[in-house]
Image (spheres, coloured by chain):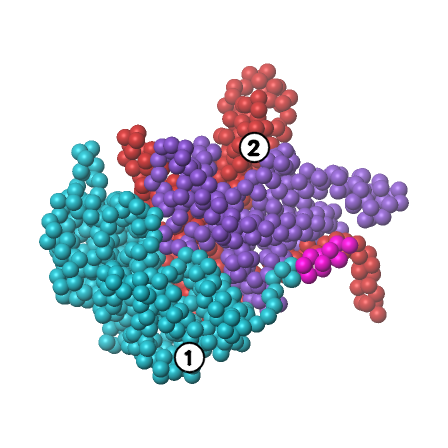
Chain colours: A red, B purple, C cyan
């Protein structure tokens, strides 16, 4: 009797909030939470898309451990992150500093730099692919200037080239974050510091940097997630080639699951992906909040 | 630096070509033609793809804004027990890419017959964890006092929400709208897996198809398609430019 | 109000997407550009005769099998699908997704087929049943750029060795050719032409196979014991040859990362002098129309180090998914496509060869058509093993490692073998 009264009481009390929250929660649960849990279970099965999954226990994970291509794509993704995260964090900071120095037409420049982010990634990737071709325009310009041509899409350079595309695309977007942070620093503090005789470097180290730190954390976390989520970029430009030099982890998961019909295996790789990303994220938060 | 790739793409799209070994400056104006664009518009299903993308993005963004706003409010005001847990879950979900959920999502959708159906594209995109995150963070910054005052004055919770909180959240909603519009428009993996009928494809998958369709890449058409496919988002960006930037600024101040 | 509009919206969307009437769903791969337009007259006539409509959806080669498998899993299989040799076995092996055509195939039909051994091969790999039926086929020829040959001063006899069916040229000849052709012609210090662009970066099936088979490799990629045949003389020879071409500089820079399309691009834009995977539509239509400056000539494949002449054989295979509720009607359409008039139409508009030997009149005197038919006798179809998808990844990856100097051919062959056997575990 008492229990039932409690439940009804809860409903009545939170009726409004439930009504508000329900669409969001339902959608999230159905389309995000449930699939993720399902993927976890699928990773213990063998399932060629057609037919019911068959339980095989940890076999997928065992196979994963000796899968050369899996490790290659994992290393590739880590490489992307290692290249992109620092670059984005630092370059957008610098860009923000530059933008801060521009007084006239700042809005216009802001828009210009954010622009690449707005263009569909598929289009951007296709266009850059054309630019990077061995006999394409960039090499043509290099030749014209008498410089050696670079094989942008070759095994050694392809990851750098793709990382460059992503950096080119996102740098403006993240610089706005920093810019906002700058604008939040009260000018009185800076003026006071100037009056006290602090030079630019000291102002930076003791005032600007500490206040910007949360934003640096945000940018680095977002760019880490972004570099792990690389898929379309690779799919459209190289499809993972040459021979897996550019294959990102998500691409491998897609290939294995959808092209080789090994969904269970793909799910296992997906679980590993998620664990790694989660650990990395937590690690980042820890490091930055302790400092 | 920012625009160069697009300028080059435009140049290539103006001539019928199968290679990219084309000089930057045309030898004569007569070389240029709109043949690629004509091909795209009249001989492929490109216009239909644009329409599909519009329907999908528009609807998904609309639903998203509503759902995220409401859920974000609830989480910000911690009205429900367990709001913090839900928020942590949302944070974790932000790291989950569609490539992973699609594995089981596809099966689920097919069981209810939503594959090859635009609705099957719209629903999974109707609540993005990032949107919830954004709304919650922003609403947190809005002082509770106004709502409480209104409640004391006798208005219903509903009215308080819409008349007081909503207007103050508009900048964030602006950001959410534009971000979600771009995100849903750009989404590649969902239409790739869920839609097979050519007539139902979205622009992103359609353009990629053009690239891989015939074994000789028609760069001219490909560039034209890429540019046209990006056009709507560019237009939206130009129109809502101020909103977007203002919102990003605030977002930067959030964390 | 919100909910009502949602319901309305979903009804609207649902209406937009369902179809009405008796329609065959046919998923076609783009063996010709714009397949819908191509099939239009055939579909029209078929409808006039039988009242059945055929709706064509185009699926790209790369995604075809994925989409078909996914559709079958979702219970939304089409009634007719287009496949190739390398693509149908996974559908048979995983989920038994295709329907046996034996009950439909009549003896008359079998008699008309130009290469009946092909059907036996299809049966053999699939446990004795016939799951696919070809409606047209093509082989690959090679091509040379006559302008480059002239510039390089290649003697006439050499060209004859490549174009006369009674003569032949070997891999050593190709090396000689490379030396003649790869030069700086205009004195600016840079090489202007190369011999051959091998698409090392792309995950296509055939570039490696063409050389592997020419070196005596197994047509099915399996040895007599049914094990993968990668660590063999043929592999090592082929890899060594490609490596030699690369090391001597006869391949253009960046070759390891070229996609197959880009490699073909190199030939059509006049940078390379030789190519070995020319399919009919390129030779007859696409190249003459789009690359008017390309002065090319079709050549036969070379004779490999074991004395074999080989080339690739591809066909457009049609299959009926088991889930289809219109199997008879689907077969009717296949039969319709196999009629002499349909075959002639197909051949005339795709430049592929009719599977029933019905040559369109305009082709009858064409020497190029003769060349394509000549090589059929030694053309090998794509291997049909269910593990082909992964094997292709493996051999392309190792070839690329060799070309970029990371491994020796012997090491690569060993790795290929090991990985291929590993892959078999899953595809048993």
The residue tagged 2 is A111
Residue occupying image coordinates x 58% and y 39%: B235
**Residue A184 drawn at (x, y percent):** 63, 29
Kindly tell me whether residue B46 is visible in this rendering. Answer: yes
Q: Secondary structure at mark 2?
A: helix
The residue tagged 1 is C101
Q: Which residues are magenta?
A: C1-12
- Whether C6 is among the magenta residues is yes
- Whether C180 is among the magenta residues is no
Query: Outermost residue, right direction?
Result: B154
Quick one: label 1, few (<14), some, or many (20+) residues within 10 Å?
Answer: some
Kindly tell me whether residue C196 is visible in this rendering. Answer: no
Image height of A142 relative to B193, above or below: above
Q: On the picture, is B246 further left or further right than A65? A: right
Residue occupying image coordinates x 15% and y 60%: C164
Q: What is the chain identity of the residue bearing mark 2?
A: A
**Residue C12 drawn at (x, y percent):** 67, 59
Q: What is the chain identity of the residue bearing mark 1?
A: C
Residue occupying image coordinates x 51% and y 70%: C47
Query: Outermost residue, front direction?
Result: C361
Quick one: label 2, few (<14), some, or many (20+) residues within 10 Å?
Answer: some
**Residue C398 drawn at (x, y percent):** 28, 57
Is A47 or A132 nearer to us in this picture? A132
Mark 2 or 1, closer to the camera = 1
Q: In the rendered image, which quarter contains the C terminus of chain B?
A: top right
């Amino acid at each position: 009797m008492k229990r039932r009264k409690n439940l009804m009481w809860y409903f009545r009390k939170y009726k409004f909030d439930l009504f508000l929250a329900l669409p969001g929660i339902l959608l999230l649960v159905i389309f995000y939470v449930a699939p993720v849990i399902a993927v976890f279970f699928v990773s213990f099965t063998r399932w060629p898309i057609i037919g019911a999954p068959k339980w095989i226990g940890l076999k997928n994970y065992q196979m994963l451990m000796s899968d050369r291509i899996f490790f290659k794509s994992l290393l590739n993704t880590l490489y992307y992150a290692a290249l992109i995260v620092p670059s984005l964090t630092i370059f957008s900071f610098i860009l923000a500093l530059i933008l801060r120095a521009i007084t006239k037409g700042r809005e216009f420049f802001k828009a210009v730099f954010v622009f690449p982010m707005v263009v569909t990634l598929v289009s951007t990737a296709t266009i850059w692919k054309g630019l990077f071709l061995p006999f394409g325009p960039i090499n043509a310009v290099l030749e014209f200037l008498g410089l050696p041509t670079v094989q942008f899409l070759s095994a050694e350079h392809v990851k750098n080239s793709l990382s460059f595309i992503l950096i080119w695309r996102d740098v403006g977007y993240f610089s706005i974050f920093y810019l906002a942070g700058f604008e939040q620093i009260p000018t009185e503090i800076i003026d006071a510091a100037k009056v006290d005789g602090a030079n630019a470097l000291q102002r930076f180290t003791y005032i600007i940097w500490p206040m910007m730190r949360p934003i640096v954390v945000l940018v680095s976390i977002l760019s880490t997630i972004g570099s792990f989520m690389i898929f379309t970029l690779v799919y459209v430009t190289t499809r993972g080639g040459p021979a897996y030099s550019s294959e990102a982890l998500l691409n491998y998961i897609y290939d294995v699951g959808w092209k080789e019909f090994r969904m269970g295996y793909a799910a296992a790789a997906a679980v590993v992906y998620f664990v790694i990303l989660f650990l990395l994220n937590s690690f980042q938060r820890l490091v930055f909040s302790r400092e | 630096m920012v625009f160069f790739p697009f300028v080059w793409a435009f140049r290539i799209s103006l001539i019928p070509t199968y290679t990219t070994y084309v000089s930057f400056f045309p030898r004569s104006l007569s070389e240029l033609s709109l043949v690629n664009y004509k091909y795209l518009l009249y001989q492929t299903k490109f216009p239909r793809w644009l329409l599909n993308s519009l329907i999908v993005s528009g609807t998904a963004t609309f639903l998203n804004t509503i759902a995220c706003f409401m859920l974000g409010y609830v989480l910000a005001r911690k009205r429900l027990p367990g709001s913090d847990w839900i928020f942590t879950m949302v944070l974790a979900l932000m790291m989950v890419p569609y490539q992973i959920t699609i594995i089981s999502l596809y099966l689920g959708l097919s069981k209810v017959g939503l594959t090859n159906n635009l609705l099957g594209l719209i629903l999974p995109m109707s609540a993005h964890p990032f949107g919830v995150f954004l709304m919650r963070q922003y609403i947190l910054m809005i002082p509770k006092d106004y709502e409480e005052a209104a409640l004391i004055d006798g208005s219903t919770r509903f009215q308080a929400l819409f008349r007081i909180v909503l207007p103050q959240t508009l900048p964030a909603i602006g950001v959410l709208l534009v971000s979600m519009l771009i995100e849903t428009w750009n989404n590649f993996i969902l239409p790739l897996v869920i839609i097979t009928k050519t007539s139902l494809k979205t622009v992103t998958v359609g353009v990629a198809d053009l690239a891989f369709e015939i074994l000789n890449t028609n760069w001219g058409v490909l560039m034209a398609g890429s540019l046209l496919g990006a056009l709507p988002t560019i237009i939206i960006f130009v129109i809502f430019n101020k909103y977007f930037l203002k919102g990003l600024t605030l977002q930067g101040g959030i964390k | 109000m919100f909910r009502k509009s949602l319901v309305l919206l979903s009804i609207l969307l649902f209406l937009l997407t369902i179809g009405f009437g008796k329609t065959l769903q046919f998923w076609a791969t783009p063996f010709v550009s714009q397949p819908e337009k191509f099939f239009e007259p055939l579909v029209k006539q078929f409808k006039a005769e039988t009242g059945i409509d055929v709706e064509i959806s185009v699926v790209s080669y790369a995604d075809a099998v994925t989409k078909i498998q996914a559709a079958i899993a979702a219970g939304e299989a089409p009634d007719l699908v287009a496949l190739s040799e390398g693509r149908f076995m996974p559908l048979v092996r995983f989920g038994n997704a295709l329907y046996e055509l034996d009950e439909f195939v009549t003896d008359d039909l079998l008699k008309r087929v130009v290469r009946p051994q092909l059907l036996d091969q299809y049966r053999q790999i699939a446990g004795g049943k016939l799951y696919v039926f070809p409606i047209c086929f093509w082989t690959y020829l090679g091509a040379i750029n006559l302008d480059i040959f002239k510039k390089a001063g290649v003697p006439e006899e050499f060209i004859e060795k490549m174009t006369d069916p009674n003569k032949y040229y070997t891999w050593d000849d190709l090396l000689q050719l490379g030396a003649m052709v790869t030069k700086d012609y205009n004195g600016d210090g840079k090489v202007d032409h190369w011999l051959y662009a091998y698409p090392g970066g792309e995950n296509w099936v055939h570039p490696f196979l063409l050389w592997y088979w020419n070196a005596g490799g197994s047509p099915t990629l399996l040895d007599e014991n049914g094990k993968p045949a990668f660590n063999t003389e043929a592999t090592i020879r082929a890899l060594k040859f490609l490596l030699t071409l690369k090391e001597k500089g006869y391949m253009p820079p960046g070759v390891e990362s070229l996609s197959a399309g880009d490699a073909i691009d190199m030939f059509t834009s006049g940078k390379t002098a030789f190519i070995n995977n020319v399919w009919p539509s390129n030779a007859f239509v696409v190249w003459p129309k789009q690359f008017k400056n390309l002065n090319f000539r079709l050549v036969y494949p070379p004779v490999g180090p074991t004395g074999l002449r080989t080339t690739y054989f591809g066909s457009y295979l049609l299959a009926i998914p088991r889930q289809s509720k219109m199997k008879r009607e689907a077969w009717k359409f296949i039969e319709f496509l196999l009629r002499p008039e349909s075959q002639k139409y197909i051949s005339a508009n795709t430049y592929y060869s009719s599977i029933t030997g019905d040559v369109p009149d305009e082709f009858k005197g064409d020497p190029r058509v003769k060349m394509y038919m000549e090589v059929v006798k030694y053309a090998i179809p794509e291997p049909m093993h269910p593990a082909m998808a992964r094997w292709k990844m493996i051999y392309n990856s190792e070839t690329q490692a060799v070309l970029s100097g990371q491994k020796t051919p012997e090491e690569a062959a060993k790795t290929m073998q090991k990985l291929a056997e590993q892959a078999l575990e899953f595809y048993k």
